[in-house]
Image: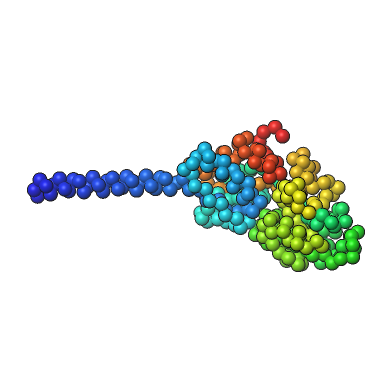
């Protein structure tokens, strides 16, 4: 081997090492990507938090997908998502996961603003969803047929609803089945004789901004975020982020930020109850 061949070989080795180093750097940069999937209740809040977080961490790439709390938890268990979003507590067979609560929310019955019915008992609600009551006249309203709207079983709101009212999911007879809170709100708007159930935080925000809907009290307690905050509303839930293992790196940094006082204003803007700070 002559000197030129020798030097050429050294240059080739140096170039290869440089490419390996650059590849490692690209791989490290790839760690700045975070995928969150799950609850449609939690997702809009997380999107706002992510936007603020990325101001401080501009290289972070955060992707958010909905599909329901059960999907978020299943994705985390399968390793196809970094963080799951769940608008419910963990179930008995999910206790091996790590949960980080961002806020509290409540669930209430939703009707059109023009509906004269002011309140329904838990038993009346149960009978409505079992098709044992099918006219508003049977619960003090006008003689009009009820349009019953429920959620798909992938959503934590559905789980909480059936557990609280003691309804077998297979026995629910709904006229319309929807996915997320926005679909529920739109469906009740489109059907003035409808009844559905929805996140208090999401609905209260819409109502304040002029959407013609109203939330019904439950067991004599008004369905307001204030009553969720003071613990008086009987049907409430945590809004959680969930991971398979203790988070590190970007996941840990983002979750810490999402649980800090720095996002309490975002939580309150969406009419949820922060878990930190003096409120």
Tell me which corner region of the image, top left, top right, bottom left or bottom right, holds residue 194.
Answer: bottom right
Q: Nearer the viewer, residue 99 or 66?
A: 66
| 263 is higher (above) or lower (below) than 241 | above
Q: Position of residue 222 (x, y in %)?
A: 82, 46
- Left or right of 220, for residue 13: left
Relative to 98, 227 lies left or right:
right
Percent across and percent down for residue 21 are 32, 45
Q: Is residue 103 visible?
A: yes
Is 258 drawn above or below residue 202 in the view shown? above
Visible residue check, residue 96: no
In-image side of 232 versus 20 (left or right): right
Chosen colour scheme: rainbow
Q: State which quarter of the image contains the C terminus.
A: top right
Q: Is residue 135 left or right of residue 106?
A: right
The count of marks equals 0
User: Residue at coordinates 70% horizontally, 32% vertically from top-left?
Assistant: 278
Q: Residue 80 location, x and y as percent?
A: 51, 55
Outermost residue on the top side: it is 278
Residue at 26% x, 48% y is 16
Q: Nearer the viewer, residue 244 or 114?
A: 114
Give the residue drawn at x 17%, y 48%. 9
Question: Residue farthest to the left?
Answer: 2
Residue at (9% x, 50% y) in the render: 1
In this rendering, is residue 261 above or below 59?
Answer: above
């Amino acid at each position: 081997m002559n000197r030129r061949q020798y030097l050429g070989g050294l240059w080739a080795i140096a170039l290869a090492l440089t490419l390996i180093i650059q590849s490692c750097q690209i791989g490290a940069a790839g760690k700045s990507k975070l995928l969150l999937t799950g609850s449609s209740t939690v997702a809009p809040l997380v999107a706002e938090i992510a936007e603020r977080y990325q101001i401080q961490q501009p290289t972070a790439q955060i992707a958010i997908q909905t599909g329901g709390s059960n999907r978020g938890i299943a994705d985390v268990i399968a390793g196809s998502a970094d963080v799951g979003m769940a608008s419910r507590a963990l179930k008995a067979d999910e206790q091996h996961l790590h949960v980080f609560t961002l806020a509290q929310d409540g669930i209430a019955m939703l009707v059109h603003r023009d509906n004269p019915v002011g309140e329904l008992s838990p038993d009346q609600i149960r009978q409505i969803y079992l098709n044992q009551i099918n006219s508003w006249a049977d619960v003090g309203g006008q003689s009009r047929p009820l349009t019953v709207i429920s959620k798909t079983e992938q959503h934590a709101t559905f789980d909480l609803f059936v557990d609280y009212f003691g309804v077998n999911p297979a026995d629910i007879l709904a006229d319309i089945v929807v996915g997320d809170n926005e679909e529920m709100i739109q469906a009740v708007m489109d059907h003035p004789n409808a009844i559905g159930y929805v996140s208090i935080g999401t609905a209260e925000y819409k109502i304040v901004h002029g959407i013609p809907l109203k939330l019904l009290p439950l067991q004599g307690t008004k369905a307001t975020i204030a009553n969720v905050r003071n613990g008086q509303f009987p049907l409430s839930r945590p809004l959680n982020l969930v991971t398979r293992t203790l988070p590190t790196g970007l996941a840990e940094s983002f979750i810490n930020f999402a649980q800090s006082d720095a996002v309490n204003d975002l939580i309150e803007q969406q009419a949820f109850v922060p878990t930190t700070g003096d409120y």
